[in-house]
Structures are given as C-alpha cells and as structure tokens.
Amino acid sequence: MVAAALRDGAIELPVLPRVAQEVMVVARDSSRGAAEVARLVERDPALCATVLRAANSAIYGGSVEIVSARQAVLRLGLVEVATLATTAAMRSALVDHGPFAAALTCWWRRALTTGLYAKEIARLRRQAVDSAFLCGLLRDVGEPVVLRVLARAHVEVGDGVDAVIAEFRRAAGTLLCDAWQLGGAVRAVVTEDVGPPWGDHVATARLADAFARLATPSPSDAAALNLYPEDLEVIAAKTPTIVASVESMS
C-alpha cells in the first residue's frame, strides 16, 4: 500500500506554510534585513507566539524575557529567529490530530531533540549550527509522511506500523525534500548519503539521533567527526538544557 503510493505519487504531502518559505528566502538574502524577518513572523500571531516561547527557552539562557519578534532578532540574530520560525511552521505542517496524533507528537519531540543535539555537536566542532539543527530536525521527516498514508488507509495504530515506517521513511522523506525544495545537506541526511560533501552532516545527525534516543553513540560516527570520549561527555552534559528546551518548544 505505502509502496504503491510512493511509486504512483499518490501521497498527499504536507504543505510547507507560505510564511516559512518566505522567512527562509529572506534569511538567505543578505540585502534584506532583520526587520523583514521580524515583520514576517509577527504577521502570523500563532507562529509569533511559538517563536517567542522558543526564544525564551533554556537553550538560549537569557535573563530578560523576549516579548517581540524584533527583540528576538536583535538578541538571537536573524538566522536563529528564521530557524525558529521555520521549525514552528514545519511542526504545524507535519503534526496533526488524526489517528496517529500521539505517534506524531512523539516523533516531533524526538526530531526536535535530535536537532538540538546536532546543534550542540556542530557548536563543539565550530560548524554551522543552523544547518546542523535543520538536518537533525528533519532526519526522519519521512515518518510523518508514512503515517499520513496509513491514516488515510484507516490502518489501526499498532498494526505493524513501526515496521512499515522503517521500510519506507527514507523514500517518503525524499519525496518531501523534493516538494519542499530541501536540497544539499538536508536531502543527504534524509537519504543517508554519506558521500562528499555532506558526510559530516550525516554523521552529525546520526550521532545526535543516538543521543536523542538515549542510545550509545556510534564510535564510527564520533570518529568520523573527530570527537573523543570527553567531547561526547560535554554533549551529554547538555541533556538537561535540551530536555527543558524541548518542553518549551513542543
């Protein structure tokens, strides 16, 4: 059933909200300022509220509450606020209230946790944290797509759903990357293409996923990123802050 839907293109893919597309475009354009990102975020009250809640989460450690999108941009930076806005918009597109609502919520929390761990790994390695976060967040983005297909086929929760997800999540994630025009590092992470130039991104997302699942990090992934046991301990020490942030951002 899922295989046929993927083959025939008969999947109703989630639509990325227009505001997320606009924010992503503005954030990549150095000729357009932080004020425009703030304006876009403020145009959507629900999105703005989510961004402000995230901006005030433990991961940023601010002592003064951020009360506006403009203030968030000034304190956190244009790229960081654009990432928060895109994340909030993606959640609204991917997490619904259908028969698999509980599974989708669980997936989102794990995806968010993976993104935040990926961010810390990138920070430790002095790599781009915004790209690492997005790659970690969307590593398993095929899961909600598969669940959407199963929901429309009226499949019951628990009927071998995990096995179906494991088999088709990569293919489904690739379709979503195409629909949302997510290329480069994100697509490589979703498809687990470990070849150059995105091998580091794949290893970072995979290592972050292990931390998110409370699993033992793969020595090969750590070695690929030139991370030593003491580095992994530094990342693990971020767990309380990451857990608190997931609560604020979910």
Image (cartoon, rainbow, N blue to C red):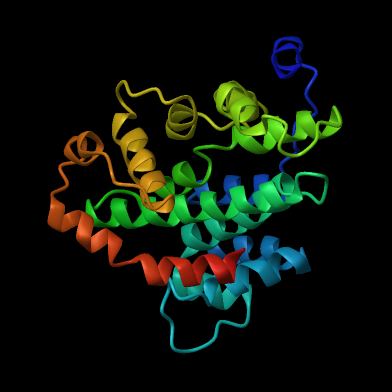
**Residue 225 placement: quadrant:** top left
Q: Is residue 124 found left or right of 189 in the rendered image?
A: left
How many numbered dots are placed on residues in this image? 0
x 29%, y 57%: residue: 123
Q: Nearer the viewer, residue 212 or 81?
A: 212
**Residue 47 placement: quadrant:** bottom right
Estimate the x, y position of residue 51 in percent, counting from the top left.
Answer: 62, 67
Estimate the x, y position of residue 152 in percent, counting from the top left.
Answer: 85, 31
Residue 123 in sight = yes
Q: In the rendered view, tell whether residue 83 sits above or below residue 65.
A: above
Estimate the x, y position of residue 202 in percent, counting from the top left.
Answer: 36, 34
Q: Nearer the viewer, residue 229 or 189?
A: 229
Q: Nearer the viewer, residue 149 or 17?
A: 149
x 53%, y 41%: residue: 138
x 31%, y 20%: residue: 195
Picture quarter with the N terminus: top right
Residue 32 in sight = no
Estimate the x, y position of residue 248 in percent, counting from the top left.
Answer: 57, 71
Picture quarter with the C terminus: bottom right
Q: Nearer the viewer, residue 25 or 111?
A: 111
x 17%, y 38%: residue: 223
Q: In the rendered view, tell whether residue 22 sits above or below residue 70.
A: above
**Residue 149 placement: quadrant:** top right
Q: Is residue 43 found left or right of 77 in the rendered image?
A: right
Q: Is residue 36 found left or right of 81 in the rendered image?
A: right
